[in-house]
Amino acid sequence: MSSTRKKRPKPKSDSSSTSSSSVSWVIEPPQSLFPSKREFLRLVAVLAIASSVAVTCNYFSNLFNPTQSPFCDSNLIDSPDSLTDNCEPCPSNGECYQGKLECLHGYRKHGKLCVEDGDINETAKKLAEWVENSICKPYAQLLCDGTGAIWVQEDEIWNDLDGHKLMENFRSDNTTYLYAKKRTMENFGRFLESRTNSYGFPVFFFCVRVKELKCPDLLTEQYKPFSCRIRQWVSRHALIIVPVCALVLHFKRKP
C-alpha cells in the first residue's frame, strides 16, 4: 500500500450556481413579469373606457358650463388695441369694468347680452295705453260734444304718471322708477302728434317753450261713441239723405 492517500475532490460551492441563475434571469426574465395576452387586452379595454368617459364628461361640462372670457372695459372699447382674443366685447346696453358686465337700468343679463327687463317693458306698455286713452278720449269728446281738449302738455303727463298704481312697483329704486317713466313716454310718443308751443312774454325775454302732444285724427275716431259716429255721419251726408228720404215718402203716399 502506498503511503500516500488520494485526496478527495472538494465539492463545488453554490455561489457559482447562484451567480449563473442571476445572470440567466437578467438575460431571460421570467414569464410572470409580463402580463398575458388576455390581461393586456383587458387593460387596453379599461383604458379606452376610462378615456371615453373622461372625454364625454369634459364635453358636457363645457357645454353646460362654458368657460367665458372676461369682458373688455367699456372705457377702452373705442381703442383698436382694446379688443383682443383674451376678452369679449362689451354688449350694448351694458357697462363692463374689470372683466365683469353690468346691464343698464331697464335691462337684465342674459348670457353675454343685456336684454330688456320684461317687467319694466310690460309696465311701460300698459302705461302708454293709459296715456293714449287720457289724451285721445278728451279730443274725441271735443269733436262730439264740444267739450274737451286737443293738445296736452308733456310735463302734465309726466307728472300724472306718478299717481298711477303701476308705478308703485318701482318706487323702491329711484333709477328704475325714472327709467319706467321715460320708457312710457317713448312708447306713446311714437304715434302721437307733437308740437312745441311758447308761453310767456317774449318782449321781456320771459318765454317758455313747452312740448305738447295730440292724438291723431284717425286714432281719435276709435274713441268716439257709436251714437256720435252715427250723428256725424248723418250730418255729413245730409244733402244726400234728405232728398232720398223725401222721394221715399213721396212714393209711399202716392196711390
Image (cartoon, rainbow, N blue to C red):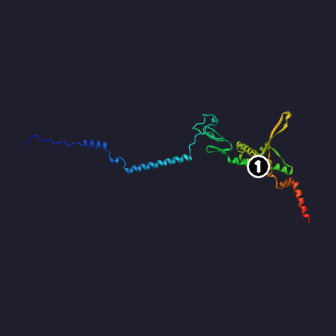
Q: Is residue 229 above or below residue 204?
A: below
Question: Measuring 45% from the left and 48% from the top, which residue is drawn there?
Answer: 48
- Which image quarter is the N terminus in? top left
Which element carries disc 1, helix, strand or loop? helix
The x and y percentages for residue 209 are 81, 38
Question: Measuring 82% from the left and 37% from the top, which residue is drawn there?
Answer: 208
User: Viewer-proximal residue, 237 or 151?
Assistant: 237
| Left or right side of 62 for 164 | right
Residue farthest toward the bottom in the current orientation of the protein: 255
| Left or right side of 202 for 102 | left
What residue sits right under mark 1 in the picture?
130
Question: Measuring 88% from the left and 54% from the top, which residue is drawn there?
Answer: 239
User: Viewer-proximal residue, 167 or 96?
Assistant: 96
- Which image quarter is the C terminus in? bottom right
| Left or right side of 150 for 127 | left
| Left or right side of 250 for 224 | left
Question: Measuring 42% from the left and 48% from the top, which residue is drawn there?
Answer: 44
Q: Is residue 128 visible?
A: yes
Residue 88: quarter of image: top right
The x and y percentages for residue 24 are 29, 43
The x and y percentages for residue 126 are 73, 49
The x and y percentages for residue 167 are 73, 47
Q: Is residue 9 above or below residue 239?
A: above
Q: Is residue 168 visible?
A: no
Q: Tell me the crowding category of disc 1: few under 14, some 14 to 19, or many 20 or more residues within 10 angstroms, Cα based.
A: some
What amino acid does circle 1 point to? Answer: Trp
Q: How many marks?
A: 1
Q: Is residue 148 above or below residue 252?
A: above
